[in-house]
Image (cartoon, helix red, strand yellow):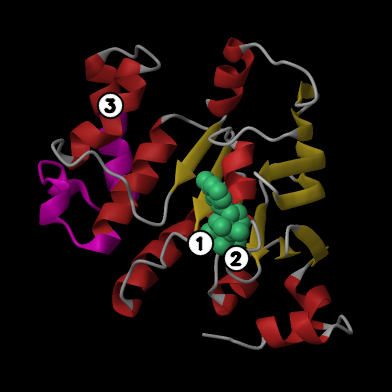
């Protein structure tokens, strides 16, 4: 289980995350919702240490980082490796093929043997339904296909948690469905998933737990069903935008 305690993050005077307490259960899917600018991306970026929190604790099955103290770089790197991030804008390497994109980190970061990395990358291409695109470059792929490659690339590192930051918000609705279906499939498997989305029907379908973030604070958490029953206009209004 991933546990976050009293996590704070400032950008200058802007107090973006305020005493965030959150537990993310292993092999479950947690969905983060909330309006734009409320700190959702920053929370994900703090979990994979793309941003360094100013205070608080993040622990993974008891192995903890306390940000009020200096943390050795090696410990941070080990922690980052536990996470696999999928960004809104895909962020594939433009001069590498789909297959090379997936193999890159296992070979360079994990020092995996190339043949083994290739075999695993082909299995992942199969998993995301894009084997026939193995030699295509990102610009030859649709946005939805690029995002599925980005998901395969994240899976290649065998992360303990998958982080998705609005994975379909750069996609046309007809391309969105393939990516959402893939995440739905992953959520039925053993993966631990944390996903930020504005798509409420997806949130309802896929979530074991929903976390509503508002102005850097967690306003509510529970099952989608439980959140719909809360007597809070702001949350009700948000959840009513079913796509
Ligand atoms: N790198 C950054 N530098 C300065 N301010 C930032 C940075 N990233 C985010 N912010 C600010 O932090 C707040 C939360 O942003 P963000 O986490 O992106 O929200 P969300 O993902 O919910 O839309 C916003 O006020 C935003 O302007
Ligand atoms: Mg965001």
**Closer to the camera: disc 2 or disc 3?**
3
Where residue 218 sits, quadrant-wise, is bottom right
- For the residues labelled 2 and 1, the Cα–Cα distance comes to 6 Å
The residue where tag 3 is placed is 104
- Disc nearer the start of the sequence (2/1): 1
Q: Earlier in the sequence, mark 2 or mark 3?
A: 3
Left or right, 96 with reference to 211: left
Regarding ligand 1, which quadrant of the image does it lie in? Answer: bottom right
- Report x, y in % for residue 192: 62, 44
Q: Say the numbered circle drawn on residue 184.
A: 1
Q: Which residue is mark 2?
A: 206
How far separated are the C-alphas under marks 2 and 3? 30 Å
Mark 3 or 1: the one toward you: 3
Range drawn in magenta: 119-144
Residue depicted at x 80% and y 75%: 227
Q: Dots 2 and 1: beta carbons under 8 Å?
A: yes
Q: Residues within 10 Å of mark 3 (few under 14, many from 20)?
A: many
145 versus 174 height, above or below: above
């Amino acid at each position: 289980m991933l546990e976050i305690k009293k996590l704070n993050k400032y950008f200058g005077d802007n107090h973006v995350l305020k005493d965030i307490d959150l537990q993310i259960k292993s092999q479950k899917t947690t969905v983060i919702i909330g309006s734009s600018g409320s700190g959702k991306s920053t929370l994900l970026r703090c979990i994979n240490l793309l941003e360094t929190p100013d205070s608080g604790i993040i622990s993974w099955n008891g192995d903890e980082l306390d940000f009020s103290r200096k943390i050795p770089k090696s410990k941070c790197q080990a922690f980052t490796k536990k996470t696999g991030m999928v960004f809104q804008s895909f962020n594939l390497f433009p001069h590498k093929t789909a297959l090379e994109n997936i193999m890159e980190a296992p070979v360079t970061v994990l020092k995996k043997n190339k043949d083994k990395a290739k075999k695993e990358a082909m299995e992942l291409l199969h998993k995301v339904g894009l084997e026939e695109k193995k030699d295509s470059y990102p610009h030859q792929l649709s946005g939805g296909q690029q995002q599925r490659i980005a998901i395969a690339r994240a899976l290649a590192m065998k992360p303990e948690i998958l982080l998705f930051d609005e994975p379909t918000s750069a996609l046309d609705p007809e391309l969105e469905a393939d990516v959402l279906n893939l995440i739905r499939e992953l959520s039925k498997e053993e993966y631990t998933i944390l996903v930020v989305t504005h798509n409420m029907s997806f949130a309802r379908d896929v979530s074991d737990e929903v976390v509503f973030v508002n102005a850097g604070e967690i306003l509510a958490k529970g099952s989608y069903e439980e959140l719909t029953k809360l007597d809070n206009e702001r949350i009700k209004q948000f959840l009513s935008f079913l796509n």
